[in-house]
Amino acid sequence: MRYHVIHIKTSFPEEWQKDVFDQTLCNYGVDTIDGENYYIPSEVWTLNSQRIMYFCVMHEDDGYVRWEGVEECPDENWNAVWESEHPMQELPLGIRIIPHCAFGAGHHETTSMMIEQLINFKFLIPRERLLQISNFKFSVLDHGTGTGVLAIFAKRLGAEHVIAVDIDEKSVENAKENAALNDVEIEVQHSSAFSFQPSTFHLILANIHRNILLEFMPSYAASLTTGGQIWMSGFYEEDCPALMEAAAANGLRFLEKHAKNEWRMLMFVK
């Protein structure tokens, strides 16, 4: 596959603004970001070049972005190059993850915090009594699944029903591959919408940047069972007040905060 590389210098005052900028370019078709280099398949660049340039020019007017040009890359198998630099990851519980071009190999601070809490979470405790009187199944949603790593851990640790959702088709395929690699059964969906029924999930995992968390907070709260929990990561300390306020406004009670370097994780219960 042929690629173009867009060279863009950014100087946003806050990290989350850069995250939003990068995510928008990914929505326009950029599939790899390496520093100031944004890689996009050439055929997608042809379709979206005007929209991408207009988007960047708007931010140039704000002084946060400097467009430095675009060029065609040599004809290489870029997926193979990327994968050669990101080999299979060996994680706790014998879980193995091949990251391809999806986020969530397991070692990034946001992902590792979630994994640590999943390992500490007692899936069996809240359901033992219910299993005696009903066909209770612990249900988990991994929203923005990437490689599927969190969904795979949830399944391995005892959740009966696990749904993994991502907006990116390549991530969906990667999550399916990793589920098969680890011999676990999870339901992987490709969707940008949130169309789950109320009171569906006992646990929601959302390792995404703060703007998406804020957008979907009402949907998260509605789809949790009473007593269900939502764990969020992918943001910084300065993002926590807005997320906590939005969670409280939607009937979610704060439980815990965790930190690794500059990254934060918040846990709430309905």
Image: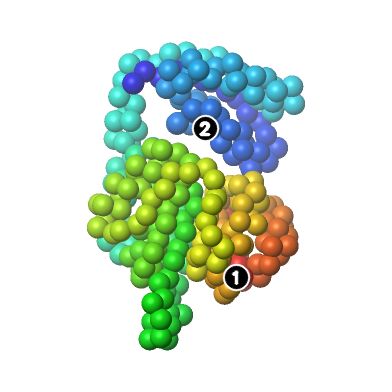
**Could you tell me the amino acid type at mark 1?**
Val
Residue 85 image-quadrant placement: top left
Q: Position of residue 154 (x, y in %)?
A: 39, 64
Q: Position of residue 131 (x, y in %)?
A: 38, 82
Viewer-nearest residue: 113 or 198:
198
In percent of the image, x 70 and y 23: which residue is there? 58
Which secondary structure, mark 1? Answer: strand
- Residue 105 seen: no
Q: Earlier in the sequence, mark 1 or mark 2?
A: 2
In this view, 258 is above or below 193: below
Task: Tell me the number on the disc at residue 269.
Answer: 1
- Residue 227 seen: yes
Q: Which residue is mark 2?
A: 26
Residues under labels 1 and 2: Cα distance?
Answer: 32 Å
Quarter holding the N terminus? Answer: top left
Quarter holding the C terminus? Answer: bottom right
Which secondary structure, mark 2? Answer: helix
Horizontal side, residue 10 vs residue 49: left or right? right
In this view, 129 is above or below 222: below
Viewer-nearest residue: 10 or 195:
195
In percent of the image, x 54 and y 45: which residue is there? 193
Horizontal side, residue 149 vs residue 250: left or right? left
Viewer-nearest residue: 64 or 219:
219
Count every numbered label the image shows and give the total: 2
Q: Position of residue 27 (x, y in %)?
A: 53, 32
Task: Tell me the number on the disc at residue 198.
Answer: none
**Could you tell me the amino acid type at mark 2?**
Cys
